[in-house]
Image (spheres, helix red, strand yellow):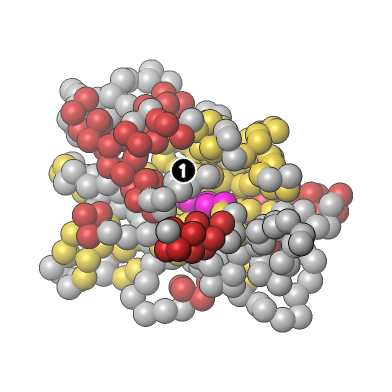
Amino acid sequence: MLGVLITLKLQAKQPPRFVVMFYNTENLFDTLNDPFTRDDEFTATGKLHWTPERYEKKIRNIAKVITDVTPKDFPDIIGLSEVENKAVLEDLINTGKLKKEEYGIVHEDSPDLRGIDVALLYKKKVFHYLEHHSIPIHFPRDTMKVRDILYVKGKTDGEMFHIFVNHWKSRSGGQKATEQKRVYSAVILRRTIDSILTFDPGAHILIMGDFNDEPTNMSIMQVLNATNKRKNTGPRDLYNLMYDMHNLHDTGTYSYKGHWNMLDQIIVSYNLLEQDKKGWHVGYEGGHIFSEEWMLYDNPKADMKVPNRTYGGPNYYGGVSDHLPVFCIFTKPSVGKKK
């Protein structure tokens, strides 16, 4: 009986948690042909032979990744990229253990020619959705169509969050050749964040995404002004939870030619860091990469384990995604009764 009481007491002292996750799902397409996008290859008769069985397997695998990240309390907020439409999101949240959590969906079709978008899933019982809109990216003197940035505003446990889900221009064509497009996306995002902070200097800003740049690249570190500074910070500075991990050897979320890249990141405003003990906060080293053996395969050419992708060119590998997800856990002090 004493052991039971001690266990209950320890459980009661656990601080509240708010789990945030981001995942690039690598071409989460349904099997239907959308006449308005370039998704023909992701059909049963397309060159990738994207059958209902392969689609269902991918949905199950993504659902398993999400439920394995924090098995005791699945993520409260899930940012996703490379999703085709709302239908695939509805299939996802109604798969396996996710169904009982009653996730809500925030999604807008973006102008991407292939039809891939970003989206946000949220637990309705935890996160009170208020509003959202898309932030378009129109490059100067360039007609290229890319994914919008998704902005979502809502509250959890009485605290307001401003959430941005991103998937910036890829490095296809070369990192340097495409860098200015990601810099421009950073300019647009930074401008939006500044407008929020001007109105509310203490706003909780939460940014996540596949930026196709690393924490030390110009777009993230200089333009967005997201760094790993722990001293001499200003009210408009942002903190990159993946920055320090990026400096570690052989660590990242995406593998390219035998080298790890930290393309997927979670960035927060400084008032969400651990020095603010009154409300939701996360530690300086609170960014994590989720990886399990079943999500990886041995790359003999690079002598390393890398994310097991669904396709490599036209070849079907049956993996989950070519990216690894990132996550962080916010906590706040438990509120107990005064004696």
Q: Is residue 281 visible?
A: yes
The answer to whether 275 appears left or right of 88 in the picture is: right
Foreground residue among 137 and 79: 79
Question: Compared to 215, does 291 lie above or below?
Answer: above
Question: Compared to 47, does 195 lie above or below?
Answer: below
Tell me the amino acid under the disc marked 1: Leu
| Identity of the residue drawn at 13% across and 68% down | 300
Q: Residue furthest front?
A: 1
Q: Position of residue 165 (x, y in %)?
A: 56, 46
Q: Is residue 21 magenta?
A: yes
Q: Mark 1 — residue?
A: 80
User: What secondary structure prevails in the magenta region?
Assistant: strand
| Identity of the residue drawn at 35% across and 69% down | 260
Question: Compared to 71, does 287 lie above or below?
Answer: below
Foreground residue among 169 and 227: 227
Q: Secondary structure at mark 1?
A: strand
Q: Position of residue 10 (x, y in %)?
A: 52, 63
The answer to whether 338 appears left or right of 214 in the picture is: right
| Identity of the residue drawn at 59% across and 54% down | 16
Q: Position of residue 176 (x, y in %)?
A: 48, 64
Q: Kindly indicate the quadrant of the structure image that contains residue 262.
A: bottom left
Quadrant of the snapshot with the C terminus: bottom right
Stretch of the chain drawn in magenta: 18-22
Foreground residue among 143 and 189: 189
| Identity of the residue drawn at 69% across and 32% down | 131
Q: Kindly indicate the quadrant of the structure image that contains residue 81.
A: top left
Q: Residues within 10 Å of mark 1 (few under 14, many from 20)?
A: many
The answer to whether 246 appears left or right of 15 in the picture is: left
